[in-house]
Amino acid sequence: MSLEEILKKYWGYDQFRPLQKDIIQSVLDSKDTLALLPTGGGKSICFQVPALAKEGICIVVSPLIALMKDQVQNLRKRHIAAECIFSGMHYRDIDRILDNCIFGNIKFLYLSPERLQTPLLQARIAQMKVNLIAIDEAHCISQWGYNFRPAYLEIVALRELFPKVPFLALTATATPQVVQDIQEKLAFKSPHVIKKSFHRANLVYVAIEEHGKEKKMLEILRKVRGSAIVYTRSRKHTKAVSDYLNARQISASFYHAGLSHDQRNERQEDWINNKKRVMVATNAFGMGIDKPDVRNVIHLDLPNSLEAYFQEAGRAGRDEKKAFAVLLYNSSDLERLSKYHDIAFPEFKLIKQVYKALGSYLQLAVGAGKGSTFDFDLPSFCQTYDLKPLTTFHSLKILQDAGWIHISESIYVPSKMKILVSREGLYSYQVENKGNDLLLKTILRTYQGAFSHPINIYEKQLARFLKTNTEKIIHALKKMQIDGILEFFPQKDIPQITFLQERVPAENLTIDQELFKFLKERDAEQIKKVITYTKDSKCRSNFLQLYFGEKDTKPCGICDLCLLNKTSSQNLEETILKKLENKAWKLEDLINDFSSIERDKVIEILSYLLENKKIKKAVDDQISIS
């Protein structure tokens, strides 16, 4: 099949998006390639199509478990065989998947970078017929990137296993330093970058300094109809903002990593299907979601980096129609961002304290634990050892950056079960335990393979079939486990911690001080760039393009600054004086009579007119012509 035929057969598209075919052809020509495509540019097709065009399997390295699982599910819906392996999976599941990749017809194997560090996995991968190695979110390999992951540095080991297989690195955000770093760290045979411009002609960037941010958000949502995302830092704040909007007849829901898997899925689907207009969320929301008709992305809190902001803002207007990316901030936010930086880099003695407590909490002996994964409840951990949640979280992040541990996001793992007795033994049990007979029959009819390996089961589905509740289903399965009839592994949906090194005594814990200092300085610089973005006076889009290394840029003509610059100071001065000819105005009313993008300029002009005695201000704040 031709590339276009593959695209049509599996995705239903008649043609590729800009640069997709160039990237695919580069890979088919066995060239190492770095592809820079902004959010919504269709990165996944760039490795999925060439992998389908060639014999063998594509290994995809991805940092986000939820994203891996979504992509595998989407491929399976298109009847493409795909698997993923991540921290916390049962050994038997991993073994079965690897066997299928070696001897079966699997086309895609998704892996978290930490998994590549295990000798067992490397040995099994070496037996596969690999046609392509794709590295998603490739900026994670660079210390200059905004989401550095030390395990990404191990990806280059695949070069030794597959010296002739091309590498395809993909990212939506990379500065010139990061672009160079990615190619060096992945040992590209020769530099090769295919890049789409970061300019989004349909996306209007706006940054407004506003004391009443919720009120301004409401004003924007009422003016610009259509689907929207509102980002905020705090989980608690997502609910408060959602309630605020619902109380004002704007349908909204909220989303964060602390919700259950079912809650997250339900709310995401409601928003995608336009049952809810606005999703108020933390940055846990949006990755991998392709909703083209988002008209507004509003940030109520300043992001930590322009890379993060560009990626989140870029979820607006993927249908190429006009959309708005609005950043609302005030002086308190600027102070809060600086304080957040200080909290993000705790003192070394606190990091040691957290590491020691972690070993005790997980009951892990010194000298043990390398490669082991544990369910991890941060609030319970902090409560047990009287630790502050925010500083503890950042201490764990530093331990991750230093290569000691890896913290995964909340992951949903469905319940599993395996029947331990023979078919004859199970029949005897059913005869003697009539209460569980119908449940066992339903499981055997609904799910295949329970006698040979652990299978996924879904208690809600079983409860619906049997017209009962999930608690009774779970109770029955646990009872049968006690009776020795089956193994039962209940579903889970919590974060996990993997120890990448053996546990050491806390006094022997080492952190690369040069790396720590570098990351702290890099974080401060990224925050500084965010603040500079809010204070820019020329063009928002230009500012972002220059940040990501684009040259010869032109003003976008549609952002708040471009529109403001089109409205000359002379015109504004004339408008102010004309308004004051007819009547005196209260200062606040006069300022608010102009659009939000003009107000800063109006205040400047009023100060100039007062200083030059062209207008006067009375005691009651009334402004009039002198």
Image (cartoon, grey):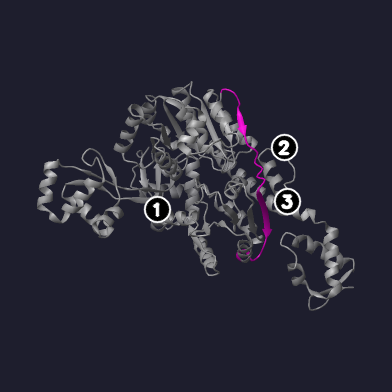
Residue 100 percent coordinates (x, y): 33, 31
Left or right: 323 as drawn, with respect to 113 = right
Mark 2 neighbour density, 10 Å: few (under 14) some (14–19) many (20 or more): few
- State the mark number for residue 536: 3
Task: Pick whichever of labels 3 and 2 is earlier in the sequence.
Answer: 3
Q: Residue at x 67, y 60 (%)?
A: 331
Residue 114 percent coordinates (x, y): 43, 37
Q: Residue at x 80, y 74 (%)?
A: 585
Name the residue tied to disc 1.
Answer: 261
Left or right: 345 as drawn, with respect to 447 = right
Left or right: 152 as drawn, with respect to 550 = left
* Distance from the alpha carbon under mark 3 to that under mark 2: 18 Å
Q: Where, by quadrant of the figure, is residue 33 drawn?
A: top right
Residue 232 percent coordinates (x, y): 55, 57
Q: What is the three-letter code of the residue carrying label 2?
A: Lys
Q: Residue at x 73, y 68 (%)?
A: 592
Front-most of 89 and 150? 89
Are dots 1 and 2 in contact, CB under 8 Å?
no
Are dots 1 and 3 in contact, CB under 8 Å?
no
Residue 191 covered by magenta stretch: yes
Tell me which segment is drawn in magenta. Answer: 189-214
Residue at disc 3, secondary structure: loop
